[in-house]
Amino acid sequence: MAVLEVKNLEKSFGGTIILKDVSFTMEEGDALAIIGSSGSGKTTLLRCLNFLETPDGGNISVKGETLFDASLPARDRERDLRTKRLHFGMVFQSFNLFPQYTALENVTLAEKLLAEKKPDFKQNKREILEGIEEHGRELLRQMGLEERMGHYPHQLSGGQQQRVAIARALALKPDILCFDEPTSALDPELTGEVLRVIRGLAEQKTTMIIVTHEMAFARDVADRIIFMDGGVIVEQGEARQVIDNPQMERTRQFLSRYTQG
Amino acid sequence: MFWQVTLSLLSGLMTTFEIFLLTLVFALPLGLLLAFGSMSRFRPLRFLIQILVWIIRGTPLMLQLIVIFYGPGLWLDNNIWSGDESGRITAAVVAFTINYACYFSVIFRGGIEGVPAGQREAGQVLGMTKREIFFKVTLLQMIKRVVPPMSNEIITLVKDTSLARIIAAYELTYAGYSFMKSAGLTWPLFYTGVFYLLFVGILTLLFNFVEKKLDYFR
């Protein structure tokens, strides 16, 4: 069964169509890269999956459970919105770490807030909080940040901040981890360390959607690639196939700019 | 004579302090309310607040004091302020509160809008409630942004309390001035400056402390 199924997704902003009839599926453990020029709708697609935008049409289901159906009235769609969101993790282009919290606090904040709502929290408060802290430290170690746990975001490099953001997104164990151009705000020297971490996650079979402009990286790391243009999916397929041997003229045009440059 | 003047000015300072403190207590929450209103999706409310802020910022505070204190008796045939000292102080606090709430609201709005939308979105995708996002994520960042302009306004308020003299509230400046009439002394009026300086000096130290406290993040 597909872990993610997106059907006929539509979205427009004030009369401008951003997404048009977008449909695709994803298998558990797959890494999917979405490529395309700026304004092609890739970021809007990710934002729809994370409920930061409300699609105008279509539906989204994860592991067979329908999370969004545009044909339902708004009140039904917004029910349990917060729990539905937790199926997805999101890593932003501009990191969006909370500046007033340390790296470790950034990673553990949401998990602690969720734990506080559970009925057994008061009795086992100390063990629960210690478990969350340990989980957070483990994630930061995994990101190669054991020396930086007590640092505040402004004391970290861009690459380190983005790795904290990845740990923060992983902390709630989402079914699908989304990356919105995770290296676009980084200079080339720092890009490598973030891509290495994402590559490591792919090797551990983390289910991921990566919106990226790094074509070589998409080809090597992703299992499948979607190429978008003007709000529609122009071409999708096995990653190497799409990059090395694109079928559509528009895909060839887009990719040629990367191979030349 | 010096001690007699000092004691008299200290009692004026107490009134100054009373007006100052009460104005802050009422104007801070009212300013926050106006800030939220000015960002509301309901257009008439936004428009109404814009008009209010325009009138209050566009006319002298001294004129507003006169309107608030004399207006009800003059135009409504109903003097709502009691004739004694407490009535004058209450009227002054009301006028200052309305005036400062308008200035505060603009500062608060800047502070709220200055927190990047990405902060709220990061909280949302982590499954946080609106309340949690406000209290755990945006509030402290907003406070940090607001402290420098607010300290400016609050220091201005200390000195603006001297305008209450115009409705004969016995605050520090009036206390100093009254020696000119009663004893023909001019120096007490200038002596009040020392009290204002000390008052503002303490506030400045306080604001520096708060700014330092919030210096650990950017």
Image (tube, rainbow, N blue to C red):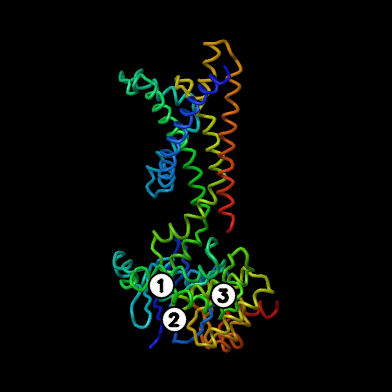
Q: In this figure, what is the number of numbered marks? A: 3
Labels 1, 2: front one: 1
Chain letter of the residue carrying label 2: A
Host chain of mark 3: A
Q: N-terminal of the two: label 1 or label 3? A: 3
Badge 2 crowding class, 10 Å Cα cut-off, few under 14, some 14 to 19, many 20 or more, is: some
Where does the image place residue B11, in percent across and percent down from the top left? 48, 25
On the question of residue A96 being in view, the answer is no
Tag of residue A24: 2
The residue under label 3 is A36
Q: Which residue shows up at 29% across the image and 68% down it?
A: A76
Q: Gap between marks 1 and 3, in whole Å?
A: 48 Å
In the rendered image, the quadrant that contains the C terminus of chain A is bottom right
Residue in front for this viewpoint, A253 or A244: A244
The residue indicated by pointer 1 is A126
Measured from the top left, where is residue B48 in percent x and y? 40, 38
Give the amino acid at mark 2.
Phe
Asked if residue B48 is positioned above or below residue B61 in the image, the reply reads below
Vertical placement of A49 versus B67: above or below?
below
Regarding residue B12, the answer to whether it shows in the image is yes
Earlier in the chain: of badge 3 and badge 2, it is 2
Q: Nearer the viewer, residue A148 or A33?
A: A148
Task: From the viewer's side, name the closer residue of A218 and B193.
Answer: B193
Quarter of the image holding residue B201? top right
Provide residue A101's location: percent of width, then percent of height. Answer: 53, 64
For disc 1, the chain is A
Precedes in sequence: disc 1 or disc 2: 2
Mark 3 to mark 2: distance in Å?
16 Å
Real-space Cα distance between discs 1 and 2? 44 Å
Quadrant in the picture for residue B50: top left
Residue type at tag 1: Arg
